[in-house]
Image (cartoon, rainbow, N blue to C red):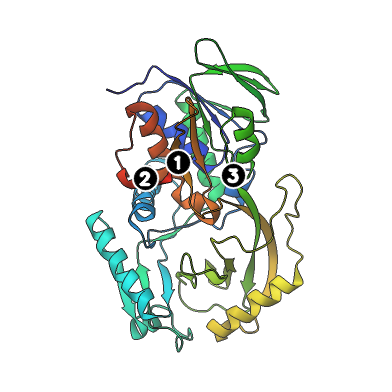
Amino acid sequence: MATTDVSVAVVGGGAIGLCTAFELHEFGVRDVVVLEKRHVASASSGLAVGIIETQYLDPVPIAIRVYSMDFFGRLERDAGLPITRNGYLRLGHSGADMERYARSVEIQRALGVTDSMVLDRAGLQRVVPGMVCDDLLGALYGPSDGYVDPALTCTIIAGLLRDRGVVVEQETELTAAERTADGRWRLTTTRGERTADVVVNAAGAWATPVGDLLGAPATVIPQRHQALFARLPEPFGFVMPSVMDYVPDSGRMGLYFRHDSDRALVAGLHTEDLLKDVVDPDRYRRGGDDLQYMAAVGEALAERLPTFADAGLDGVWSGIYPIAPDGEPSIGPYRDHPGVMAAFGGGGSGFQSAPGIGRTVAEWIVHGAPRTVTGVRELLPDR
């Protein structure tokens, strides 16, 4: 039986928090508030590179992203969200990679994604002319994948929430929380007190201190990552797909790049493993003045795309991947902390998976169990 007469406070105004509030309202929950200590998309979500895709390897991450892609498509159709559908390639170096990619295509087909495919080396070279592929066997390819402006996306969702009467309180920090005699939450914020039946911890890089306030442990390790622009003096002649030279759980950093304009790419080094650069989310450099990092990206980019060997590198910025110790997000209720829902630990792919995470958390609250991504029970916060 659905429960819609519940009051919910969502802590965090990034993509995951906003999507959770949106899905709750879709299910008929009318007493929802989003508490954001700064402003909407002011942290990881607004600093993401905006790639959206379904080319993951295991059933649960794929299912989360399949729902998310559908959600972004609805925003495109109904709210005017611009999506650049340039395609997405996950490069494969080994036979084991290619076997996992073939299984991914099977999983995606079962979930309704009809155009994902495995490319051999020749097919890969046709999709990205001029890319060095001698060390590759092929790639996992999603032609309909693409990228969006993350800050604009969050702004659109926040606007839709406000149009529906959902309160999005910015410049509002949660400072204390206690359970009342009737089992509800009394929340103290910098703008006064609120009460709620359920609190959703969607605080991203700040999930750990929010979890401490709620008495519900939330281990998130903030890892600083940078991205930059690689610019050519002349157009390179085609729409570049998003290319990821990283396989999850590989324990290494991998080059990625995506189209930005006919003369520029966004590029960086990606990992979903805990490797380096753990920072305080309140005190880290958002600028990107790490010349060693720029050189590493430039060298990797030139090796993969010789056309960009002499590209100018500029516009470097930094953001945070809120990574859990096991690299997996925490989604759903705590066994021993009633009235608290986890929606954190998305790492470097939290933005693209936010709609699926928000849908799952809303289903836990309203229906008492996940329905869209049923295997998500393996991501409960006290797993």
Residue 121, image x, y percentages: 37, 84
Residue position for label 3: 219
| Marker disc for residue 376 | 2
The span from disc 3 to disc 1 (Cα, nearest Å) is 13 Å
Left-right relation of 229 to 165: right
Contact check, label 2 and label 1, Cβ < 8 Å: yes
Give the quadrant of the N terminus. Answer: top left
Find numbered disc 2 in the image and state the secondary structure of the residue it sits on. helix
Sequence-first disc among 2 and 3: 3
Q: How many labels does the image show?
A: 3
Q: Which one is in front, 375 or 148?
A: 375
Q: What SS does tag 3 mark?
A: loop
Q: What residue type is labelled 3?
A: Thr
Q: Can residue 371 be seen in this view?
A: yes
**Where is residue 191, by image quadrant?**
top right
Q: Is mark 1 on a helix, strand or loop?
A: strand
Q: Which of 200 and 33 is in front in this view?
A: 200
Which class describes the residues within 10 Å of circle 1: few (<14), some (14-19), or many (20+)? many
